[in-house]
Image (cartoon, helix red, strand yellow):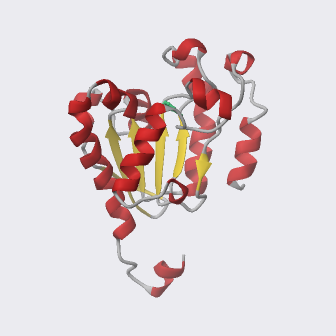
Amino acid sequence: MRLEEIENEIRSCKRCELWKSKTNYVPGEGNPKAKIVFIGEAPGREEDIQGRPFVGKAGKYLTEVLKKLGVERSEVYITNVLKCRPPNNRDPKPEEIEACKPHLLKQLEITRPDAIVCLGRFSSDVILNEFGLGFRGISRDRGKVFEVEKWDKIVKIIPTYHPAAILRNRGLAEYFESDLKKAVEVLKRKPKTLLDFFS
Ligand code: URA
């Protein structure tokens, strides 16, 4: 299956009730061969209007930090736990997360990234539990680099704060940036063999 097929599948999803109140589905966007996948919580107002992830204030900040670290948005893949906006940006409900999770897992199965950055507690909870690592809260787990064996390689899972949290508390920015830096390091890994180089 290709990434666009999943994105199209998402655009007709009725697995939970959120499709009724959304304006647009927000499946995700970016490089299908991305080495880093960023996973947020759910689309906000601006994302719902545009049908694209992280294009509001928090998204602009995320894009800015990536640029500072020498990474363009088009190099990575960006998506969310939920693909539809919860009304008034309320927290995702457990049943919505469960209903939407297969979409996210398929997106990961296709991109097979070297690093997964979990933006905020919902994303960290879903991913760490999915990979059998357990989530102990964002303040405890952020900045840790978890490593799992997956897709015949070691995949890094890096939980960090949600960029919207940084906009509310600028004092957290240095932690956020250092967490993202850990993920960006996978882009600098040297290929071990010629085969790695071309794959
Ligand atoms: N917040 C999120 O979690 N995701 C978005 O796409 C935008 C804001």
In the displayed structure image, the side of residue 180 where residue 34 appears, left or right: right
* Residue at 69% from the left image edge and 21% from the top image edge: 22
Q: x%, y% of residue 93?
A: 53, 16
What residue is rendered at 42% in x and 84% in y? Answer: 193
Q: Position of residue 62 (x, y in %)?
A: 42, 42
Residue at 58%, 40% in the rendered image:
104
Along the line of sight, the residue nearer the viewer: 154 or 142: 142
**Closest to the observer, 74 or 189:** 74
Image quarter hosting the N terminus: bottom right
Q: In the picture, residue 7 is in which quadrant? A: top right
- The residue furthest bottom is 194
Observer-nearest of 193 and 61: 61
Residue 67: give x, y in percent of width and height. Answer: 40, 55
Question: Number of numbered discs present?
Answer: 0
**Residue 82 visible at all:** yes
Residue 184: give x, y in percent of width and height.
35, 58
Question: Image quadrant for the C terminus?
Answer: bottom right
Q: Residue at x 39, y 29 (%)?
A: 164
